[in-house]
Image (spheres, rainbow, N blue to C red):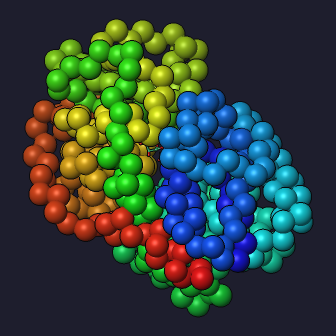
């Protein structure tokens, strides 16, 4: 079986890293990797291939830093050429980025069955580019690998039961990755890290592209950082916007994006996570840390329902109130994401 893996953005390298390790155990599967180039800085891309020993991409398309239409359109054109050349049996796409959608469109038009890893997630916010990408990708996929029960239910409610596809609850490949790589966690260099600190990341379009939301978030983080160190590896998107707005941040410890192994260390040693990242909300849970999510809704509702995570939106007072007063659930002994067996289930199903 030949699998064509389409990846391009940071969280996809991590997810595909877990699945590629599983694929490598099977001599009868050949994986061909296409990197769209959506993320291209070395600390947003190369570092993950190096640290996670992900096979070097067979194709690098170099399509990043563009508007949604230009990026997705150019990816479609180039991925189609690769599919003509490689004639894969399966196209594998991950998550909900523009690279995911481009791969799904090519596969569906050329009648190559698509495996969607992280299917069925919904925020029910159609303004999110990711929500559009994931709904369209799910609809044309053959195998819908759902990380959670809620994802399975979402698909059933949308009538996927009656479509020509298979819904499989696989669990979450990000847990596979975290469980494997945490043993290799590395303390970040060139930054002074206090005994107690909070780990934060901000990059979501709904926050970065709204000046009021972004200012509220940073004012809250600056206030928290007066009493406890806040370490924030800064996404290039957010970096550019902070510079353009001329935001002055004096308390937060801002660092460049770090590798996955450094992130494992930061997660393991932090007291709390404050983020708008999808992946980090779950990683906080994997590392038994409370999480405040800077969004109005989340796809990972089981974290909210179980009291591990709270939605704070982008309201300074609400963020500070939750930070000071919320009583988080600290009993993390519950299996929400499949306990590290997702990649194995996915490959078994495809075989
Ligand atoms: C993308 C995904 C988002 C995911 C995120 C993970 C879409 C629509 N969005 O958002 O779902 O959560 O990746 O991090 O696919 N940039 C650089 N260097 C890089 C990468 C990006 O400078 O290596 C800058 C560029 O100015 C670029 C901007 O960041 O235009 C945004 O990048 P883009 O890939 O369009 O979206 P993300 O915000 O990264
Ligand atoms: N991550 C990383 N270095 C960083 C920030 C994040 O390795 O500086 C990892 C993080 O641990 C998680 C993934 O990147 O595994 C999440 O990606 P991101 O937040 O960019 O995207 P999202 O999950 O929101 O789509």
Task: Quadrant for the N terminus, please.
Answer: bottom right
Front position in the image: 297 or 8: 8
Residue 284: percent from left, percent from top: 29, 47
- Vertical placement of residue 159 versus 329, above or below: below
Please tell me how many numbered marks the rendered image carries. Answer: 0
User: In the image, 3: left or right of 154?
Assistant: right
- Vertical placement of residue 93 versus 261, above or below: below
Residue 9: percent from left, percent from top: 60, 45
Front position in the image: 66 or 55: 55
User: In the image, 344: left or right of 126?
Assistant: left
Residue 128 visible, this angle: no
Residue at left offset 83%, top offset 47%: 74
Residue at left offset 49%, top offset 58%: 18
Residue at left offset 17%, top offset 26%: 196
- Vertical placement of residue 199 versus 93, above or below: above
Furthest toward the front, the residue is 27
- Based on the displayed image, in which of its 4 quarters is residue 5 positioned? bottom right
User: In the image, 31: left or right of 261?
Assistant: right
Task: Quadrant for the C terminus, please.
Answer: bottom right
- Based on the displayed image, in which of its 4 quarters is residue 32 positioned? bottom right
- Based on the displayed image, in which of its 4 quarters is residue 112 positioned? bottom right
Residue 329: percent from left, percent from top: 13, 53
Residue at left offset 48%, top offset 80%: 168
Residue 280 visible, this angle: yes
Residue 257: percent from left, percent from top: 48, 28
């Amino acid at each position: 079986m030949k699998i064509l893996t389409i990846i391009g953005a940071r969280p996809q390298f991590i997810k595909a890293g877990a699945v590629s390790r599983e694929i490598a155990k099977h001599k009868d599967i050949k994986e061909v990797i296409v990197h769209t180039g959506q993320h291209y800085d070395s600390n947003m891309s190369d570092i993950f291939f190096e640290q996670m020993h992900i096979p070097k991409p067979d194709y690098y398309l170099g399509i990043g830093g563009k508007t949604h239409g230009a990026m997705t359109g150019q990816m479609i054109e180039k991925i189609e050429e690769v599919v003509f050349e490689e004639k894969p049996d399966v196209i594998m796409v991950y998550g909900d980025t523009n690279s995911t959608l481009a791969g799904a469109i090519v596969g569906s038009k050329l009648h190559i069955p698509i495996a969607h890893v992280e299917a069925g997630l919904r925020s029910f916010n159609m303004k999110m580019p990711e929500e559009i990408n994931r709904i369209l990708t799910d609809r044309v996929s053959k195998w819908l690998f759902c990380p959670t029960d809620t994802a399975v239910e979402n698909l059933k409610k949308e009538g996927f039961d009656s479509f020509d596809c298979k819904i499989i609850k696989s669990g979450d490949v990000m847990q596979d990755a975290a469980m494997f790589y945490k043993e290799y966690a590395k303390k970040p260099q060139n930054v002074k890290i206090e005994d107690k600190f909070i780990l934060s990341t901000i990059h979501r379009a709904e926050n970065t592209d709204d000046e009021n939301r972004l200012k509220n978030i940073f004012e809250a983080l600056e206030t928290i950082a007066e009493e406890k160190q806040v370490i924030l590896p800064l996404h290039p998107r957010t970096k550019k916007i902070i510079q353009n707005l001329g935001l002055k941040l004096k308390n937060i410890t801002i660092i460049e994006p770090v590798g996955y192994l450094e992130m494992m260390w930061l997660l393991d040693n932090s007291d709390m996570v404050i983020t708008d990242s999808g992946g980090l909300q779950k990683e906080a849970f994997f590392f038994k840390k409370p999480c405040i999510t800077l969004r109005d809704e989340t796809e990972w509702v089981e974290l909210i329902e179980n009291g591990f995570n709270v939605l704070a939106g982008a309201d300074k007072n609400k963020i500070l109130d939750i930070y000071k007063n919320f009583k988080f659930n600290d009993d993390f002994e519950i299996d929400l994401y499949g306990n590290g067996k997702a990649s194995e289930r996915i490959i078994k199903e495809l075989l």
